Amino acid sequence: MELKEDFLWGGSLAANQIEGNWNIDGKGPAIMDYVTSGSYQKEREVTDEIEEGKIYPSHTGIDFYHQYKEDIKLLAELGLKALRISIDWSRIFPLGDEEQPNQKGLDYYHDIIDTLHMYHIEPIVTLYHYEMPMNIVKKYDSWMNRKTIDLYLHFCETVMKSLKGKVKYWVTFNEMNHIDPQTENSDLFTYMITGIKYSRMENPSQMIATMSYHMVLASVKAVALAHYIDATNQVGCVFGLTPVYPRNCNPINVINAFQEMEKDYYQIDAMTQGKFPSYKLAEYQEAGIALKITEADQEAFHMGKLDFIGINYYMSSVARYTGDDDQEETIFGNVQNPYLQTSEWGWAIDGIGLRYILNYTYHKYGLPILITENGLGAVDTIGENGSIQDDYRITYLQEHISEMKKAILEDHVECFGYLTWAPIDLVSLTTGEMKKRYGFIYVNKQDDGSGDFSRHQKKSFEWFQEIIRENAKQL
Ligand code: BGP
């Protein structure tokens, strides 16, 4: 048995990490435009204003805004059958609350989609990959306000109607499950998802619950809207999922790990089961958190069930445990797995974890799954002859693709595509660095500001080309 002939081999990108040109052709400032570059050791800083002398990676990206035609040509040469891009909300509605869209923004995305079609690449469009207009945060308090749901839906409707017939696969949100701060004192994740710093929240548990609820509601409404606009639309939502392993078979550690993993699933439950989960409401009630749920909301949950689930998978983790004391912490506050190697950024490399999470999620929902992101962030060096020998990336992808095949062919998980993060080097989300590279295509942009933005194929380019050509039969 082999993968289906129409299996979607592809790549994923996000506007704020590639486009650059943050303030031209009518684009308004968006939340990621205020985030500086950082590193593994130093968290990215979020500033209230654009400060002189600081580096804001989204302002330049990899200049995809001007180079997309050449980039897509290269991706076509790579053999991609699908490309996931995000549409930057602040290019379409610079302030977020206008009636009429910015035509230049729409034209730009039309041209990208047309170029993809020219090369027979299926576009997959994310509607929210952290590109919220800053004005929505300042004027309406972001997702705290129900008005933001309407603004988001107006944006979705505008884009969906405009691209009707050209785009079939839509993603309502990227990784809203990471709205909680990943570690104590970290502002970054909550900010990236909502535009509001965690440290500025007066009652963080209440605020995060409210914003998460409003985003979930926005997502189910966007699903119903997409189906209404075009019944053939296929709509998913993307989650960053991580298997959480117990340190050992002590039942207390097993249940703790299980519960920690489950925290990432209540939003998926709400988007697939036709109602907001009662166990979550009970948990909120115990914690003194109140949500306002209207009858119309309840109807919306019924009407907007997902067609597929998008999974971003990079690593597995080990839950903190009771008993011993030598718990070496990872960047996301968990414990290192002694059986696994980590990337240079401390992310545990675990191909079997992908098979695990695919099985786990599929058994829960029975919905088709699209792997929307998977890849290795690593430092690449250019050899004397100009070549980039990224064998570590090939090894990583090989291991993950082979485990995905087992999930599909042996475990019978319905997974219809595999998109790498990312087919071309881009700005890292968590650190803002360029040197954390993911691509098959190297982009000559360095963190010190040097580089001519030229593109170069790495060794993995030819390797992945062959994987696609052979439909991964060789793995
Ligand atoms: C995911 C995001 C992406 C992406 C990726 C890798 O969570 O959806 O936007 O960047 O993580 O993370 P990083 O760029 O920090 O290595």
Image (cartoon, grey):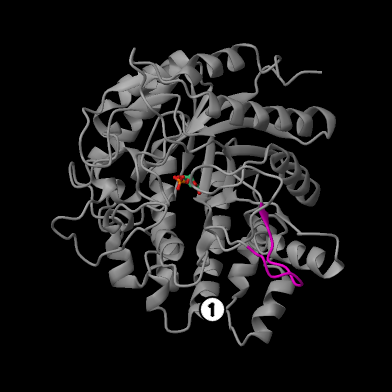
Q: Is residue 254 magenta?
A: no
Mark 1, other Cα within 10 Å: few <14 / some 14–19 / many ≥20: some
In this view of the protein, which residue sits in the foreground, 31 or 118?
31
**Outermost residue, front direction?**
326
Q: Is residue 43 left or right of residue 369?
A: left
Pinpoint residue 54: horizontal percent, then vertical percent.
20, 55
Relative to 303, say whether 190 is above or below.
Answer: below
Kind of residue sitting beneath label 1: Ser
- The span picked out in magenta is 317-327
Task: Please state, as top left, top right, bottom left or bottom right, where the N terminus lies in the image.
Answer: top right
Q: Secondary structure at mark 1?
A: helix
Q: Residue at 34%, 34% (x, y): give it.
A: 109
Pinpoint residue 129: horizontal percent, then vertical percent.
43, 49
Q: Main secondary structure of the magenta part?
A: loop
Q: Is residue 280 left or right of residue 122?
A: right
**Outermost residue, left direction?**
52
Residue holding disc 1: 205
Q: Is the CB of the residue bearing disc 1 within 8 angstroms of ligand 1? A: no
Q: Quadrant of residue 81?
A: top right
Q: Residue at 41%, 40% (x, y): give it.
A: 436
Pinpoint residue 433: horizontal percent, then vertical percent.
35, 45
In this view of the protein, which residue sits in the foreground, 69 or 298?
69
Q: Quadrant of residue 46?
A: bottom left
Report if residue 366 is visible in the image: no
Q: Residue at 40%, 44% (x, y): give it.
A: 428
Relative to 27, say whether 248 is above or below.
Answer: below
Task: Please state, as top left, top right, bottom left or bottom right, where the C terminus lies in the image.
Answer: top right
In this view of the protein, which residue sits in the foreground, 464 or 110?
464
Report if residue 228 is visible in the image: yes
Q: Is residue 54 left or right of residue 180?
A: left
Pinpoint residue 134: horizontal percent, then vertical percent.
29, 61
